Image (tube, rainbow, N blue to C red):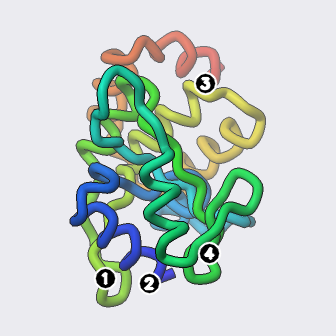
Amino acid sequence: MEKTLQVLNTLENEGVLGKYAIAGAMGATFYIEPVLTFDLDVFIVLPQQGVLLTLAPLYEALRVRGYHEEDECVNIEGVPVQFLPAYNTLIEEAVAAAREINYTDTFTRVLRVEHLVAICLQTGRDKDRERIRLFREQASLDMEYLKEILKRHGLEDAWQRLNK
């Protein structure tokens, strides 16, 4: 995965994509025991190009480097990467507040656990509710920070329903 992250850092440095952060099941593994996953979900902020946001320049930059699409992912150095544009204010905030870490010797960002919980709550799938349960059992959550996020993004009622 380190080589994959190096490619992402290069694309960010070249301005092909804006800030990125690891999310999804792979992001969760920074806080809880690993869960089965087949890809690396990466939330990205795309450079504004007119009115529309498009992944076309990113995919073209990857093709030039020899990486190709496989279903909804791009295989980068043997790792299927799914690029997910920041599609709402919660995701934008999560990417902006992502933790900066080193994965072995390579810089990367991973969403904070509190944002991962809020995103799971917002998405609301069965697997997301299960992941929230795991976060609550295994991760060190800053509950005050989580409550602030939930309030900002109108998720307080969903949190209350989950905790009944």
Q: Which residue is mark 2?
A: 2
The answer to the question of whether label 2 and label 1 lie on touching residues, with beta carbons closer than 8 A, is yes
Q: Position of residue 127 (x, y in %)?
A: 74, 42
Q: Which residue is mark 4?
A: 79
Q: Toward which corner of the image does residue 146 lie, by quadrant?
A: top left
Which comes sooner in the sequence, label 3 or label 2? 2
Q: Nearer the viewer, mark 1 or mark 4?
A: 4
Q: Position of residue 164 (x, y in %)?
A: 65, 19
**Residue name at image x 29 percent, y 41 percent:** 47
Q: Nearer the viewer, mark 3 or mark 4?
A: 4
Q: Position of residue 16 (x, y in %)?
A: 32, 55
Q: Residues within 10 Å of mark 4 (few under 14, many from 20)?
A: some
The answer to the question of whether label 1 and label 3 lie on touching residues, with beta carbons closer than 8 A, is no
Marks 1/4: CA distance?
16 Å
The answer to the question of whether label 4 and label 2 lie on touching residues, with beta carbons closer than 8 A, is no
Which comes sooner in the sequence, label 2 or label 1? 2
| Residue 106, numbered label | 1
Identified by mark 4, the residue type is Val
